Amino acid sequence: MFPKNNQPSKDKNTLSGIVSINDLKEMEFNDKELTPQQHLALKNYDRYRVKELNKQQTEKDFHKTYLQLQAMANLTPFEDFLREEYF
């Protein structure tokens, strides 16, 4: 599914060639080798996700945040999760 350069081709599985966190998780699941930056983005996203979910005071807020995080993982380029705010 992904070429040897660890970047998905522009097909129905990517949004305009953007590689998302979910794309990286799929690559990892399919035993594709990830770059150190891709691994770091996954680690940062997972840490951020847990931190944000743990902040929520009500079940309603938890579910709202959960849906927002799912959307981020699916639509945001993984490079965004290399920014300091996600460390």
Image (cartoon, rainbow, N blue to C red):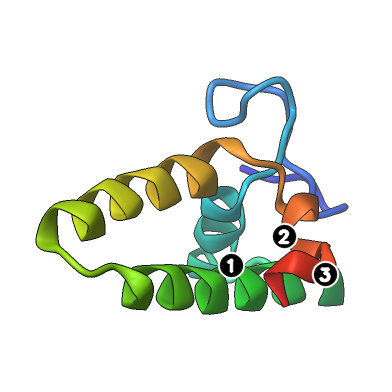
Decide: is 40 above or below 45.
Answer: below
Q: Nearer the viewer, residue 76 or 58?
A: 58
Q: Earlier in the sequence, mark 3 or mark 1?
A: 1
Q: Nearer the viewer, residue 46 or 29?
A: 46
**Residue 81: mark:** 2
* Quadrant of the snapshot with the N terminus: top right
State the image coordinates of residue 17 (x, y, percent, origin top left).
Answer: 74, 28
Disc 1 residue type (three-letter):
Tyr
Q: Quadrant of residue 43?
A: bottom right
Decide: is 44 above or below 25.
Answer: below
Horizontal side of 44 relative to 50 (left or right) equals right
State the image coordinates of residue 25 (x, y, percent, origin top left).
Answer: 53, 62
Label 1: how many Cα within 10 Å (few below 14, some 14–19, many 20+): many
Disc 2 residue type (three-letter):
Phe
Dot 3 falls on a residue whose secondary structure is: helix
**Residue 10: mark:** none
